[in-house]
């Protein structure tokens, strides 16, 4: 899906470089968040001796008891997906 956004400004300077820099900065923040979230997920995998895919299947299928760790792990999975979706959206953005 192609989306187009028009930005107007009465500023005497070009906002194009500012928008490009803002997008690059947000990409950096998202990449940092993705890396930290992956580290937390890896710690859960190591602690419980199962992959995240296995955990998600078992947790969503209610094969695992709801514990604080498992709720946190599930939340980290959702957070990772959200961060990756945002990163993909911005990584493909072009300021014309």
Image (cartoon, rainbow, N blue to C red):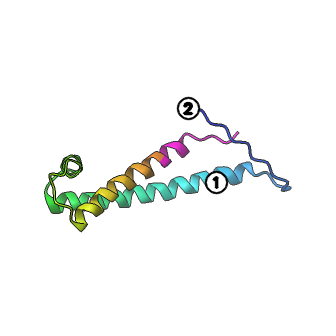
Query: Around disc 2, counting alpha carbons within 10 Å, would you say few (fewer than 14), some (14 to 19), or many (20 or more)?
Result: few
Establish if 64 lies above or below 92: below
**Which residue is denoted by mark 1 in the rendering?**
21
- Disc 1 or 2, which lies upstream in sequence? 2
- Residue furthest to the bottom in view is 68
Query: Which of the two residues, 71 or 11, is positioned nearer the viewer here?
Result: 71
Q: Which residue is drawn at 21% across and 46% down?
A: 57
Whole-percent x, y for residue 37 in the image = 35, 59
The residue located at (65%, 49%) in the rendering is: 20
Magenta segment includes 89: yes
The quarter holding residue 44 reads bottom left
Q: Distance between the residues labelled 1 and 2?
A: 24 Å
Q: Does dot 1 land on a helix, a strand or a loop?
A: helix
Place of residue 11 in the rendered image (x, y in percent of width and height, measured from the top left): 83, 56
| x 33%, y 58%: residue | 76
Left or right placement of residue 83 versus residue 7 in this view: left
The residue identified by callout 2 is 1
The image position of residue 81, as x and y in percent, is 39, 49
Q: Is residue 40 left or right of residue 45?
A: right
Q: Locate residue 14 relative to residue 65 in the image: left or right.
A: right
Mark linked to residue 53: none
Quadrant in which residue 41 is drawn: bottom left
Q: Position of residue 64 (x, y in %)?
A: 16, 56
Q: Residue at x 49, y 48 (%)?
A: 86
Question: Magenta part of the protein: which range?
Answer: 86-96
């Amino acid at each position: 899906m192609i989306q187009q956004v028009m930005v107007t400004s009465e500023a005497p300077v070009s906002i194009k470089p500012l928008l490009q820099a803002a997008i690059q900065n947000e990409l950096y923040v998202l990449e940092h968040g993705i890396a930290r979230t992956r580290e937390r997920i890896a710690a859960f995998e190591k602690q419980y001796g199962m992959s995240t895919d296995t955990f998600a299947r078992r947790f969503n299928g209610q094969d695992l008891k709801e514990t604080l760790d498992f709720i946190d792990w599930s939340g980290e999975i959702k957070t990772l997906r959200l961060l990756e979706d945002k990163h993909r959206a911005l990584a493909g953005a072009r300021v014309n």
